[in-house]
Amino acid sequence: MNIKRILITGGAGFLGSHLCDRLVDAGHDIICLDNFFTSQKRNVAHLLGRPNFELIRHDVTRPVFLEVDEIYNLACPAAPGHYQYNPIKTMKTSVMGAINMLGMAKRCRAKVLQASTSEVYGDPDVHPQPEDYRGSVNPIGPRACYDEGKRAAETLFFDYHRKNNTNIRVVRIFNTYGPKMHPFDGRVVSNFIRQALAGTDITIFGDGSQTRSFCYVDDLVDGLIGMMEGPDEFVGPINLGNPNEYTIKELAELVLELSGSSAKLIYTSLPADDPRQRCPDITLARTRLNWEPGVVLREGLLKTLEWFHTIDIADYRAPTPNF
Ligand code: NAD
Ligand code: UDP
């Protein structure tokens, strides 16, 4: 087997920790780099004794010099409450983090994958969203620090590719859920599950008719690795997400049914610039990567609920006052 030295920034986070698990188990030499802004060491604590795993506390807005073959650049707060807590830092993380990781990739001749997002499409007026849709983002709204930061990072990735021949991959991730989501990240799946298990009100923002498409984390990790290992000519951007679309009210009802909770649905105001609908067109991922999500929402929610039953909620705290 070809053992690679792989850097995962944001590796202690929700997606990053699953990616660490998978690549450590595959026998690669993994460096997990994180500043723990939205995560905790417990997500990767079980890997600390493994000889092919290393953990570094570092902030991607600062340069770092490592020797690696591949970089997955995942470092960035991803939940709206987290990225709006310090929006200027969020933009710096996306832009300066991208510059630092692209610089490292250029120096090491490493392959570098950017975790971009469906948020580059903003509140879309094309549905479902294909990769050539250029988006409808409000550049001065409360979500802009994240959306525009990720858009600028994509620009940097493609400029490094064109000008320096850097070996890049750009993946646009749609809403992903699963075990190890931070219970207080404020995202819809973690909120609804935590509320259902505690028997407190389920908070639907707006009338619950807005839609999202939810991808189970194992499927997403398959897609990330598939893209990294795919042919160098295929750099993306590529959508990764589950194309089955649900209203937020349908999601709430499903969480209630699966958890057996009798919590009440309550309706509160819709946050500014909240996208009305979101669903990936994954034709490109299907044809170029032969990738297709396999876990249906019901099954993925059951696995996520199972994990929430194993944790002690008191071990987690709401990490931002925005929640
Ligand atoms: P997460 O918040 O659990 O993970 C992000 C990780 O990055 C955390 O461990 C955090 O501590 C770390 N981090 C943040 N700022 C940092 C900095 N300046 N330096 C070093 N580390 C830093 O979120 P996630 O859901 O695992 O998301 C991972 C990546 O995937 C993010 O880039 C996010 O934008 C992208 N993404 C995720 C989703 C999703 O649904 N989960 C959707 C679209 C895009
Ligand atoms: N949402 C909700 N109740 C919550 C949290 C979120 O109704 O407790 C809604 C939110 O307004 C949005 C959708 O669920 O329409 C998805 O929100 P999330 O923050 O998970 O992700 P994003 O908006 O970034 O897709």
Image (spheres, grey):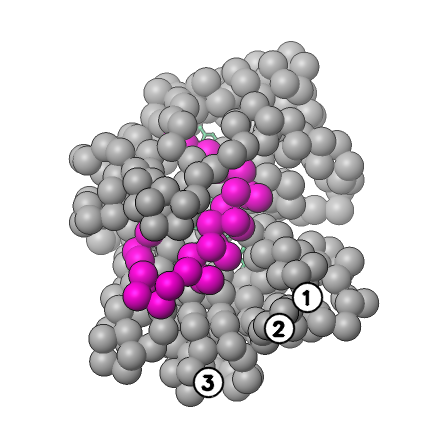
**Which residue is depicted at the point 51% across and 34% down?**
294
Q: CA distance from mark 1 to mark 2?
A: 7 Å
Counting from the top left corner in percent of width and height, residue 139 is at 22, 53
Characterize the local packing of mark 2: few (<14), some (14-19) or many (20 or more) Cα atoms within 10 angstroms: few
- Which tag is nearer the camera, tag 2 or tag 3? 2
Q: CA distance from mark 3 to mark 1?
A: 21 Å
Query: What residue is shown with label 1?
Result: 27
The tag earlier along the polypeptide, 1 or 2, is 2
The tag earlier along the polypeptide, 2 or 3, is 2
Kindly check if marks 1 and 2 are in contact, taking CB atoms under 8 A apart as contact: yes
Q: What type is the residue that disc 1 sits on?
A: Gly
Q: Is residue 140 left or right of residue 108?
A: left
Question: Magenta span covers which residues?
Answer: 212-240
Residue 235 lies in the magenta-colored region: yes
Task: Indicate the secondary structure of the residue bearing disc 2.
Answer: loop
Query: What residue is shown with label 2?
Result: 3
Residue 76 lies in the magenta-colored region: no
Note whether ligand 1 is within 8 Å of mark 3.
Answer: no
> Can you name the residue that lies furthest to the front here?
1
Query: What residue is shown with label 3?
Result: 108
**Which residue is depicted at the point 66% across and 32% down?**
303
Counting from the top left corner in percent of width and height, residue 79 is at 47, 47
